[in-house]
Image (spheres, helix red, strand yellow):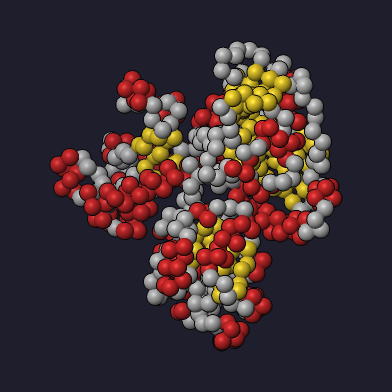
C-alpha cells in the first residue's frame, strides 16, 4: 500500500501503523554471520523502515511503528543473546536500533516486544493462527492491542493525563500520620510494606522528572500532614508537590480546587487513593478524573498505575524536564500577584520574550503544545510533526514560537502561531492564522499582545498587509472567545476576523524582547 499508494493517498489516512514480521527483514541472515554482517543487516532493515516512514509522512499521516516480536525458537539457549547471527540477538538489536531511529524521526513506537516480555509470548502469539493466516497477534490479545494503539493516538492528540494526585495515609505511607505520629508510620527500607510505599514514591518522583505534575489530596490536618515529609525515609518532599490540599472537605471538591489552582482540566487528573469509598465517590462526582482501582496490597500499586497508560507520551522535551520547577515558580508568581496591583505585578516579573520560527530544534515541543493545548487554542486543529515541519518549510507561510522568561525562571516555549496564505491569496497580501495556542501557565501576562506585536512586525517585513483568523468555539476554549476583538481584529462573519496591518498600532506590554538564537 505504501509503495503503490494510489488507494492509500485517496483514503488520506490520519495514521499509518506498521505491524511487520522480523523474519521479513532478517530471515536471510545466516546463523554463522559475523558481527559486522549482522550489524549491516540490522542497519539495512532500519533503512528500509525509514523509507516506509517517509512515504507514510508524505501522505500527511502520523506514523506508528510496532516493535518486532521474537518468534523464533532458541537455538543456543542462553547463548542466543551472545551469537551475532542468532535470531533472538538480531531481533533484540533491530528493536534497539528501531527505537533510536523512531525517536529521531518523530515516529511513534508501539513497543509490543516489551509488553510481550512482561506478559509472556503465549499471551500475545498463537502459532496456530500464524500458520493458518499469518496472524501475529493472537485473537485474545486483540482488545489489549487496540488499547495500546489507542493510547498512542490519544497521546498524539494531547489526551494524556498531566497530573498525578495522591492521597497520603496508607497510600504514600503505611498508617495514619495523625494517629500514629511521625515515628509510627511505615515507610522505607527494612520492611516489605514500607518498601512497597517507597516504590510508589519513587515512581511518582520519576513521573515528576518527566513532566507529570504531582499534587496531594488528603483528608488530614494540613500541618500534621506536612510534618510527615520530614520523615528520614521519605523520598518525596513537600516541595515536590505543585498543589497540596489537606483538609476535611470531600475529595471531589478538593480535586476541583486542585484543577483550578493548576489551571488544568479535570480530565488531566489521575487520583490515587487506597480507600475504595473515596475512589467511588470521586468516580461518581467527577467521571472525567481517572481513578485506578487499587488492590489491598501496596506492593501492586506501581504496576497498576504504570500499566494503565494514563501518562503515555509521544515526546520528551526540555519543557517536560523543567515542568516541576515551572510550577514551583508559578507559586512564587502567584504570591507576588497577591498584592492585587496587576500592572505592578507584571512589571515586577521582569518578563522577556524570545520569538523565532519553528525549526527542527523546537519541532517536538511545538507539536506537543499544539496537540495538548485546549483552553488557548483558536482552531483546535491538531498537527503531526510532519505537518508542522511542512508548514515551517513553506516559504509562503509563517511560523512563530515564543519562549517567556521572567525573574523566577524560564517557562519554555509557551505559545505557537502557524500561518498560511489566506484562501484566494497568492504571494503577498494576506496570511491566515491556522493555529494559535498558548500554555495556560502564562495566561494573563500580556503574552498574546506581545505575540501579536511580533507577528505584525514580521508580517509587515514580508510585505503582508492583512492578517486573518478564525475562532472555533469548543467546550474548553471559551476563555479566549473575545481574543480577536480584544486584540483589534475586525469581524469578518461566521467566527472570522481580520486585522489590517496598516491600521494596527503596537500594543503596550510589560514584556521586553530578546532575539531568538
Question: x, y percentage for residue 9?
Answer: 37, 23
The image quadrant that residue 5 belongs to is top left
Question: x, y percentage for residue 345?
Answer: 81, 51
Determine the residue positioned at 39% across, 26% down: 12
Can residue 221 be seen by looking at this rendering?
Answer: yes
Indicate whether 65 appears above or below 175.
above
- In-image side of 323 versus 94 (left or right): right
Indicate whether 409 appears above or below 174.
above
Q: Nearer the viewer, residue 46 or 271?
A: 271
Q: Nearer the viewer, residue 399 or 319?
A: 399
Determine the residue positioned at 69% across, 47% down: 442
Quarter of the image with the C terminus is top right
Question: x, y percentage for residue 181?
Answer: 60, 86
- In-image side of 129 versus 56 (left or right): left
Determine the residue positioned at 69% across, 59% down: 328
Quarter of the image with the N terminus is top left
The number of numbered discs placed on residues in the rendered structure image is 0
Indicate whether 72 appears above or below 494.
below
Question: x, y percentage for residue 208?
Answer: 58, 59
- In-image side of 123 versus 396 (left or right): left
Indicate whether 84 appears above or below 220.
above
Determine the residue positioned at 68% across, 46% down: 443
The image quadrant that residue 366 belongs to is top right
Q: Nearer the viewer, residue 413 or 167?
A: 167
Can residue 54 be seen by looking at this rendering?
Answer: no
Amino acid at each position: 500500500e505504501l509503495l503503490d499508494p494510489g488507494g492509500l493517498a485517496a483514503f488520506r489516512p490520519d495514521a499509518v501503523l506498521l505491524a511487520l514480521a522480523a523474519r521479513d527483514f532478517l530471515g536471510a541472515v545466516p546463523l554463522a554471520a559475523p558481527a559486522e554482517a549482522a550489524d549491516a543487516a540490522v542497519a539495512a532493515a532500519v533503512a528500509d523502515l525509514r523509507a516506509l516512514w517517509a512515504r507514510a509522512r508524505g501522505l500527511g499521516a502520523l506514523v506508528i511503528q510496532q516493535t518486532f516480536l521474537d518468534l523464533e525458537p532458541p537455538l543456543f539457549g542462553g547463548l542466543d543473546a551472545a551469537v551475532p547471527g542468532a535470531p533472538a540477538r538480531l531481533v533484540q538489536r533491530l528493536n534497539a536500533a528501531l527505537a533510536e531511529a523512531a525517536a529521531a524521526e518523530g515516529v511513534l513506537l508501539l513497543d509490543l516486544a516489551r509488553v510481550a516480555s512482561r506478559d509472556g509470548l503465549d499471551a500475545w502469539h498463537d502459532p496456530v493462527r500464524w500458520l493458518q493466516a499469518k496472524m501475529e497477534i493472537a485473537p485474545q490479545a486483540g482488545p489489549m492491542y487496540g488499547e495500546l494503539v489507542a493510547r498512542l493516538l490519544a497521546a498524539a492528540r494531547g489526551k494524556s493525563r498531566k497530573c498525578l494526585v495522591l492521597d497520603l495515609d496508607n497510600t504514600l505511607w503505611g498508617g495514619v500520620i495523625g494517629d500514629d505520629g511521625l515515628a509510627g508510620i511505615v515507610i522505607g527500607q527494612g520492611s516489605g510494606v514500607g518498601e512497597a510505599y517507597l516504590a510508589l514514591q519513587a515512581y511518582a518522583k520519576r513521573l515528576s522528572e518527566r513532566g507529570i505534575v504531582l499534587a496531594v489530596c488528603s483528608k488530614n490536618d494540613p500541618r500534621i500532614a506536612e510534618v510527615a515529609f520530614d520523615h528520614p525515609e521519605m523520598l518525596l518532599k513537600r516541595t515536590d508537590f505543585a498543589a497540596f490540599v489537606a483538609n476535611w472537605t470531600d475529595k471531589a471538591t478538593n480535586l476541583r480546587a486542585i484543577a483550578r489552582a493548576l489551571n488544568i482540566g479535570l480530565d488531566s487528573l489521575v487520583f490515587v487513593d487506597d480507600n475504595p469509598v473515596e475512589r467511588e465517590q470521586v468516580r461518581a462526582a467527577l467521571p472525567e478524573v481517572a481513578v485506578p482501582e487499587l488492590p489491598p496490597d501496596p506492593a501492586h500499586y506501581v504496576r497498576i498505575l504504570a500499566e494503565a497508560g494514563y501518562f503515555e507520551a509521544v515526546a520528551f522535551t526540555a519543557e517536560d524536564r523543567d515542568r516541576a520547577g515551572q510550577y514551583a515558580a508559578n507559586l512564587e508568581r502567584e504570591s507576588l500577584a497577591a498584592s492585587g496591583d496587576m500592572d505592578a505585578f507584571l512589571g515586577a516579573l521582569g518578563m522577556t520574550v524570545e520569538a523565532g520560527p519553528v525549526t527542527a530544534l523546537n519541532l517536538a515541543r511545538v507539536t506537543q503544545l499544539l496537540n495538548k493545548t485546549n483552553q488557548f487554542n483558536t482552531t483546535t486543529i491538531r498537527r503531526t510533526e510532519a505537518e508542522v515541519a511542512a508548514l515551517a518549510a513553506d516559504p509562503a507561510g509563517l511560523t512563530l514560537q515564543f519562549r517567556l522568561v521572567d525573574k523566577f525562571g524560564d517557562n519554555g516555549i509557551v505559545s505557537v502561531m502557524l500561518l498560511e496564505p489566506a484562501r484566494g491569496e497568492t504571494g503577498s497580501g494576506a496570511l491566515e492564522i491556522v493555529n494559535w495556542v498558548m500554555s495556560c501557565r502564562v495566561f494573563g501576562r500580556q503574552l498574546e499582545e506581545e505575540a501579536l506585536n511580533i507577528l505584525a512586525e514580521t508580517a509587515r517585513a514580508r510585505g503582508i498587509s492583512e492578517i486573518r483568523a478564525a475562532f472555533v468555539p469548543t467546550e474548553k476554549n471559551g476563555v479566549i472567545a473575545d481574543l480577536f476583538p480584544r486584540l483589534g481584529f475586525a469581524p469578518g462573519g461566521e467566527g472570522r476576523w481580520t486585522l489590517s496591518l496598516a491600521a494596527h498600532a503596537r500594543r503596550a506590554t510589560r514584556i521586553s524582547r530578546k532575539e531568538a538564537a
